[in-house]
Amino acid sequence: MSYTVAACAAVGAVVLLDFAVLGTRLLGRRIFWTAYGIVLLFQLIVNGVLTGRGVVRYDAGAIIGVRFVHAPVEDLFFGFALVTATLVLWVWAGRRGVDRRGSEHRSSASGGGAQRSRKSTREDRGEGAGRTRRDP
């Protein structure tokens, strides 16, 4: 599989992931394109330096030959797919309420959730370790 085919497949897969599979529709938002523009600027700088100085070389048979700031256009496609997939998964996980600290840190309707959350957070930071706390 050539780099061109892989990069185009990655773009197609991430568009399907965004619109059809997870339904985040991130590609339809202005904020996404603003953020991606910032990422793209730095990608072009790094790609330009690495390919312009010959640090990274590409097999002419694996790319279509179109270059932008010394780097093959496939790099832009692949970079777009990677950044977009990461952001789509991030938004999807956030909407589902995925929390790296676990469910015990979320407040609950059963009461005491907020107190547990504050207490656990202090313990996670190492505060109050080895001490006994008295409630008034």
Image: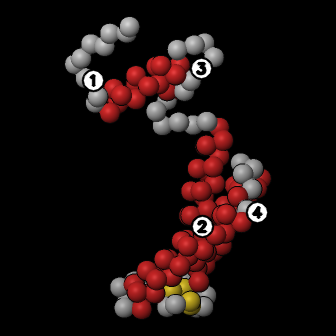
Q: Amino acid at mark 1?
A: Gly
| Element marked by disc 3 | loop
The answer to whether residue 93 shows anywhere in this view is yes
Query: Residue 128 bears which disc, if any?
Result: 1
Which color mode does the image show?
A: secondary structure
Asked if labels 3 and 4 touch by Cβ distance under 8 angstroms, the answer is no
The residue that mark 2 highlights is 35
x 53%, y 19%: residue: 113
Mark 1 against mark 2, which lies toward the viewer?
1
* Real-space CA distance between mark 2 and mark 4, rounded to the nearest whole angstrom: 13 Å
* Real-space CA distance between mark 3 and mark 2, rounded to the nearest whole angstrom: 34 Å
| Element marked by disc 2 | helix
x 42%, y 92%: residue: 52
Query: Residue 28 bears which disc, if any?
Result: 4
* Real-space CA distance between mark 1 and mark 3, rounded to the nearest whole angstrom: 24 Å
Query: Residue 108 bears which disc, if any?
Result: 3
Question: Which of the marked residues, 2 or 4, is nearer the chain's N terminus?
Answer: 4
Asked if labels 1 and 4 touch by Cβ distance under 8 angstroms, the answer is no
Q: Which one is nearer the viewer's eye here, 109 or 5?
A: 109
Mark 4 against mark 1, which lies toward the viewer?
1
> Relative to 49, does residue 26 appear above or below in the rendering?
above
Q: Where does the image place residue 121, in percent across and percent down from the top left?
A: 40, 29
Q: Which one is nearer the viewer's eye here, 46 or 56?
A: 46
Q: Where does the image place residue 65, in percent across and percent down from the top left?
A: 58, 91
* Real-space CA distance between mark 4 and mark 3, rounded to the nearest whole angstrom: 34 Å
